[in-house]
Image (cartoon, grey):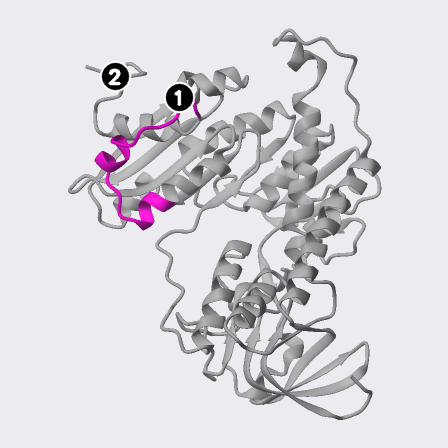
Amino acid sequence: MVVGDVTTAVDVLVLGAGPGGYVAAIRAAQLGHHVTLVDQGPPGGTCLNRGCIPLKALLSSSERYYNNRQEELAAMGIMTEAVRFDWPKMQVWKQSVVDRLADGVRRLVAGNHIDYVYGTGWFINAQEVRVEGEHGSHRFKFDHCILAVGADAASNPHLPYDGERVLTPEQALLLPELPETLSIIGDDYIALELATLFGRLGVKVKLFSPGEQILTGGDPTALRLVQAGLRKLGIVAVTKTTIESVIDRPVVISQGVSPHTAGLHLDAAGLTTSSNGDIAVNAMQQSTIPHILAVGDCTGGRALASIAMKQGKVAAEVLSGQRVQFAPLVTPLVVHTTPEIAMVGYSADEATQAGYTVVAGRFPLAANGRALTLGSDNGIMQVVANADDGVLLGATIVGLRAGDLIGQAALAIEMGATLTDLAEILYAHPGLSEMLLEGVESALGRAVHMLTKG
């Protein structure tokens, strides 16, 4: 490119190279489009570079440290010297994971012949975008545009972020040294995972939840196990707390996100937004201007990379003329606490409130052979089904590798599987997946591996 007000015609212009954006760009390229992808930073966006992946990497390393302490291994007959950790080296390893994945995304973008432009874009009108970046200012005239500009941590007027005493979750992951104490405000999965990370490493953590429980929408019975795990890490959890009442510093605030749409000049394109700045879209990810689509966090809703990636695929296919829409029945949520918790579909209370007559089953992890061979007995499987026809409505798993197991329940719900369908499947033994079988058989009133009342 050259500096100056030159206009380049493009087929598909994608603004934002996070999970929604780069996936949309690749899918559009697969469908035969010439795609230009614009972002001011490296591909992968917040999730890969500053959020999801860095947090999960640090959670993994902290979990290995915590589970390999001398007193934990001694019970299995393993004697070792005291296990220590090095926070700066953890950060280096975390970054190596990020770099490897980011390089993979770069290779995918290049391999699909997508033009990558470093810069920031905004609308001139409904057909053109100006980008300021590495080669100065440039205009793009597009046939279709996909907005995947993401979101930033929601600000709070009572506690403005300063990067030192009041931190966003991303800033907390970049702390050069571990603080002795840390307060965390929030009742979402990010707040719980941050508390778990720092609690495992010996930081005295206080978790302040504005709601009535530590995780919005979680099943109370399951959350009691998670809260017990937090207490074991020395984490103090306080509910029904106002943000103004938290005076301890440093403090991390995790209370949702705000769409990163303020600088897009959406009014110049005639796009409609909510009062929060979310871009209004239909089930095909089309905005009020049909050839301009939007995906991911900038559209509101739950800020999950899984949602953004699926919406990116839908947007690319829609602009290619395919009759598709974003319409999942359920969205799994995984929280990497100790123990893990994973949820999909309805809890029993939610199903009842939705008008279903509910049948539920549960099975303790302590009765699962594979869990005990792995040295874990803290957890539970809960399933919820429609009593009228046995169709599975939801599942909650607390325990070892809950996040990996929840996919089976999500698939069952999407396919309309019944309790009987799931009970007829042969599950590998001994295996953690048998937890689903046992939970289903409990709901059917024929549990074998636990005593029932009667």
The label shown at residue 429 is 1
Q: Is residue 55 above or below residue 278?
A: above
Q: Quadrant of residue 191?
A: top right
- What residue did someone put label 2 on? 452
Query: How many other residues sit within 10 Å of disc 1, few (<14), some (14-19) or many (≥20)?
Result: few
Locate the N terminus and report the quarter of the image it occupies. Answer: bottom right
The label shown at residue 289 is none
On the image, the x and y values in percent for residue 117 come to 72, 74
Residue nearer the viewer, 272 or 121: 121
On the image, the x and y values in percent for residue 394 come to 34, 42
Q: Is residue 413 magenta?
A: yes
Secondary structure state at the residue bearing disc 1: loop
Q: Is residue 30 magenta?
A: no
On the image, the x and y values in percent for residue 318 come to 43, 74
Disc 2 versus disc 1: distance between alpha carbons? 22 Å
Is any atom of residue 313 visible in this view? yes
Relative horizontal placement of residue 257, taking residue 373 as reference (left or right): right
Does the CB distance between marks 2 and 1 fall below 8 Å? no
Which numbered disc, 2 or 1, marks the residue closer to the eye? 1
Q: Residue furthest left?
A: 388
Say which residue appears at 79% left-offset and 28% top-offset.
85
Q: Which residues are magenta?
A: 411-431
Say which residue appears at 61% left-offset and 40% top-offset.
193
Q: Quadrant of residue 207?
A: top right
- The amino acid beneath tag 2 is Thr
Locate the C terminus and report the quarter of the image it occupies. Answer: top left
